[in-house]
Image (tube, rainbow, N blue to C red):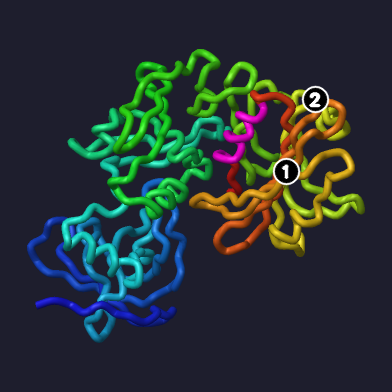
Amino acid sequence: PYLEWFNGNSKVGNEVYVAGFPLGDPEYTLTRGIVSKENADGESNWASVDHVIEYDAQAAGGNSGGPVINANAQVVAVHYASSQQTDDQAFGISSDIAQGIVDQLMQGNDVYAIGINGRAIINDDGSIFGIWVSSVKSGSPADNAGIRPGDLLRQLEGLVLATDGTLADYCDILRGRSAEDTMSFSLWRLDTGEVLEGQLNGREAEVVGTLGDNTAADSGNTGASGSGSFMTVNDDSGQLAVNIPVEWAQVDGGAWVNDAGDNMGVRVVASPNIDGFINSWSMPGVSFRASDSLGLDDKQLIDQLDFSNDCQYGGREADADQLYSGQYDIWSNCGETGSTYVVLTAVPDDAAFVIHIEAQLVSDADSAAFDEILNSFIVQ
C-alpha cells in the first residue's frame, strides 16, 4: 500500500494530519491540525527549503521524514521540523518540491548532497561566517577532496557562504549542480589555523595560507591586488557584502542618496582614497549599490551610464551566477592614467531589486581584484 501525492496548493485552514511513529514508538500515531501558513520561511542555519508549509498538528522528533496528509489521505508535505518554543508550529516540505526529490532518492541518486553534515554560523559582529562541518561521509566528494569535520567552509564556486547565517546560498549552489560536478571551494581549518583551497570531484584541498598571516585568511580566497589579501566589507545596514583588497581601507557604508537628497537604497564604497576614486581616474576603488525602488531594471540602468567623454567603450559582457544575472560594460583608457572603468548591473531571479557596481581599475592587480568582487558580492 502507498499514499498518493497531493498535486494542488495547500490553503490556510485546510485540515491536515501528521502520521508516523515518533520517538521510536512502535505504535502508529496520527495528529490533526490545519495549515496555518502556505509559504513559511524555509531558510535556517541547518536547512534551506524552497516551499514550506506550516501547520499546527503536533509532531515529535520521530515524525521527521513522514507524511503530512489531507482528509483524502493524499500527501501534502513531508514533515521535517517543529518549533522548539511551542507545540503548535510544525513545518513540512511541500509536495511540489518533495515529489521530485523522493523520485530521485528512489532511483538511488544523491540529491543536493556532497557528503557534508553542517550548519551555517556567523559571529556577533559578522566577521566570521561559513558552513561549519560537523561530519563528512566516507567516500563522498567532500571526503575525497580532503574536507574534514571541524572545517569552516567559506566559499563554494567562488561565492561567499552564510553571510546571513543560513544555508540559503550554499543550497542554491548545490541545486544548480549535480553531486558529480567539479566545484571549487575554500575553507578555514580552525584546529591548525590553515586556509585551504581545492575542488570537489577535482583537486584535493591544499594549504594556501594561515589565519595568522595576510595571505588568504580574510576571504578564504587567494588573489592578486597589492598584498594579494582580501577582506569582506558591508554597508551600514548590513545588507550588502563584498570582498575587496585590504589596501582599499577607506570604506563608506552610508545610504545611496541621489543629488536631490532622496534615499534610493543601500551602498558601500571602498578605495585607498575615496575622494580620489570619485574625482579622478588615478585611484582604484569600488562602489556597490542596491535598490528596490529605483524605477529602472538592470538594462535600463546600465544604458544610462555613459563615460565616452573620458574613456573608450570596450563592449558589454553578460554576467550570471547562481544568485544574479546581468551585464557589465568595460570602459578603457580613461583619463590621463589610461585606467579601466567597469560598470555592472544585475538582478536576482525574482528581480526584487537592482544591483549597481562601478569599479575603477588602475593596475593589473586591480583587474584581478575585480574578479574577486564579481565572485563575492551579495545582497542579504
Spot occupied by residue 251 in the image (x, y as percentages of width and height): 73, 31
Location of residue 31 in the rendering, given as x and y in whole percent from the top left corner = 24, 73
Other residues around mark 2 within 10 Å, as few (<14) / some (14–19) / many (≥20): some
Quadrant including the N terminus: bottom left
Count of picture labels: 2
Instruction: Find out whether residue 222 is within the magenta segment.
Output: no
Q: Is residue 49 above or below residue 277?
A: below
Q: Which residue is mark 2?
A: 273
Tell me if residue 271 comes above or below residue 120 in the rendering: above
Q: Position of residue 320 (x, y in %)?
A: 55, 51
Residue 181 falls in image quadrant: top left
Relative to 191, say whether 78 is above or below: below
Q: Is residue 293 visible?
A: no
Kindly identify which numbered label has been placed on residue 258.
none
In-front residue for pair 219/8:
219
Q: Which residue is mark 1?
A: 314
Which comes sooner in the sequence, label 2 or label 1? Answer: 2
Query: In terms of depth relative to the viewer, which is nearer, 164 or 289?
Result: 289
Please give the range of residues in magenta.
366-376
Would residue 57 be found to the left or right of residue 26 on screen? right
Neighbor class of circle 1 (other Cα within 10 Å; few <14, some 14-19, many 20+) is some
Q: Amino acid at mark 1?
A: Gly
Tell me the residue at 36%/34% (across/down): 199
Quick check: 217 above or below 52?
above
The amino acid type of the residue labelled 2 equals Asn
Label 2 and label 1: CA atoms lie apart by: 26 Å
Q: Main secondary structure of the magenta part?
A: helix
